Amino acid sequence: MVNLDDYIDDEDEDGAADFDALKDSLKALADAVASTNLAVMLAAQGDAAGATQRVQASVAALTRFQAAYAVLDEAPEGDEAEEEG
């Protein structure tokens, strides 16, 4: 497995923050997908309580994803000025 931390310049704080947000959002999205898959399997087995817990975990993971993605979605102040001009 490749460690992407090797490709980040430690002095570039904006790039490092974006990279951390990207990692967090991808981890949260993977957690949401896994929890949803488990919820479907548990529901098919008739375990409503287990499925409910996995759905709640999936919603929590999607909330984490949304928070992490919001950091990536913010446009840097310099880019907005360039687009208007």
Image: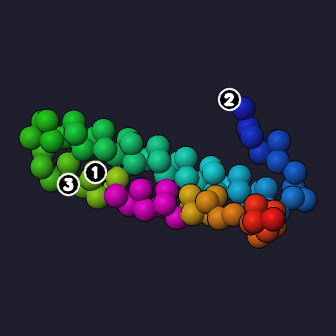
Tag 3's secondary structure?
A: helix
Question: Which residue is the site of mark 1?
Answer: 54
* Mark with earlier residue (2, 1): 2
Question: Where residue 47 appears, x then y in whole percent?
Answer: 12, 45
Q: Is residue 64 magenta?
A: yes
State the SS at label 2: loop
Which secondary structure dominates the residues rendered in magenta? helix
Instruction: Name the amino acid type tagged 3.
Output: Thr
Disc on the earlier residue, 2 or 3: 2
**In the figure, 42 relative to 83: above or below?**
above
Left or right relative to 85: residue 29: left
Marks 2 and 3 sit apart, C-alpha to C-alpha, by 34 Å
> Which residues are the magenta region?
59-67
Per the image, label 1 sits on a secondary structure element best described as helix
Q: Which residue is nearer to you in this view: 35 or 21?
A: 21
The C terminus - image quarter = bottom right
* Residue receiving disc 2: 1
| 78 in the magenta segment | no
Local packing at callout 3 (Cα closer than 10 Å; few below 14, some 14-19, many 20+) is: some
- Label 3: which residue? 52
Residue 76 lies in what quarter of the image?
bottom right
